Amino acid sequence: MSGLPPAVSQAIEWYARRASGSFDEAAQRQWQSWLDADASHQQAWQSLQQQLNRTLTPLAQQPGTARALRASGHSRRRLLRGALGLGGLAVAAHLLSWRGGPLHERWGSDLRTGTAERRTFHLDDGSTLLLNAESAVDLNFNASQRRVQLLRGAVLAEVSKEAAPARPFVLACPWGEAWLDGGSCLLSRQGNQAQVWAMSGELEWRTPQQRQHLSTGQGLAFDGQRWQPITPQHTHQRSWISGLLEVHNQSLGEVIEHLKPYHHGLLQVSDGAAGLRISGVFTLDDSHSALAALKDVLPLRIDSYLGLWTRIDRA
């Protein structure tokens, strides 16, 4: 179903397969694995079901359509796919336009990057944004403000100072906002954690509870509950700008989370291996070399299946 986001197309296919009359236990496990693999899959599935309650109910009330829906085999799957395709278009439009939703972050955001892609975007005001791999932002520039909302990943903003100070530059995430007139600022988020750094110049970090000034080299980290200062020595969250992953006594689980945006296919680490601690500098642009380097210094077994799934276990 060309033109639809992959999650929506996959949800439509799974729905048709489940309704085909030949969906066994193995297929059920495969569907559940797909559903659990990504939040966008769950959102697409739920929204598709809601849409189809409105699409298929009137169809089922028609005698000819009702007979086809009761029939088994290819005819019912073909009818379902036709109705699902129409419903899926509406679902896709809704999900892509829902700012903050998982599909919007991946395919509907104003600026975004894919796997293993760092990219610089030039804005109309002369500022630039460097997005880390698998990152996304939304833009809202108007007469009173230049606002960049980080949806996922990390972004480095090099802010052009305007002649008239009427439009501050705001770099925002769900837990705070960096306000600056010029200079550069880095903002990253992962799950319910975030970091902000004043890379050059000064900025004001604003939350509903407080305002705090940051000068060059100062940073704050959000641990899911509150913001705390970061010592200048802890620069690993900024090393992606140079294509590196710098870690200081971090768990392997954390390291793998940083590698995932640069790795094609599923990258999984077992609970037994995730707690191992490591320090070092690794290249982001070649995730396989980074994994090999990790194996050189840690007791690991790394298995790759058809280049699609890589699993890391403790040896």
Image (cartoon, rainbow, N blue to C red):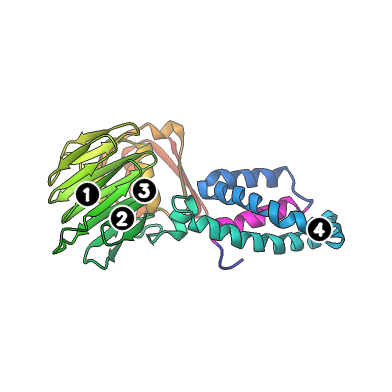
Give the percent coordinates (x, y) of residue 44.
57, 51
Which of the pair 146/290 is nearer the observer? 146
Which of the pair 182/84 is nearer the observer? 182
Marks 2 & 1, CB-CB < 8 Å contact: no
Give the percent coordinates (x, y) of residue 274.
40, 34
Q: Nearer the viewer, mark 1 or mark 3?
A: 1
Instruction: Tell me which residue sits at (71%, 54%) in the image.
Output: 17
Q: Secondary structure at mark 4?
A: loop
Q: Secondary structure at mark 1?
A: strand
Q: Is residue 7 magenta?
A: yes
Q: Nearer the viewer, mark 4 or mark 3?
A: 4
Specify the amino acid type for callout 2. Answer: Val
Q: Secondary structure at mark 3?
A: helix
Specify the amino acid type for callout 4. Answer: Gly
The reply, left or right, for residue 12 in relation to residue 289 is right
Specify the amino acid type for callout 3. Answer: Leu
- Distance, label 3 to label 2, CA atoms, is 25 Å
Residue range corresponding to the magenta coloring: 5-20
The disc label shown at residue 73, or none: 4
Give the mark, 4 or 1, whose residue is nearer the N terminus.
4
Residue 292, compared with residue 273, is above or below; it is below
The reply, left or right, for residue 277 in relation to residue 213 is right
Which corner quadrant holds the C terminus? top left
Give the percent coordinates (x, y) of residue 70.
84, 54
Give the percent coordinates (x, y) of residue 182.
16, 56
Give the mark, 1 or 3, whose residue is nearer the N terminus.
1
Residue denoted by label 3: 259
Give the mark, 2 or 1, whose residue is nearer the N terminus.
2
The disc label shown at residue 148, or none: 2
Which of the pair 108/241 is nearer the observer? 108
Marks 4 & 2, CB-CB < 8 Å contact: no
The reply to whether residue 77 is visible in this rendering is: yes
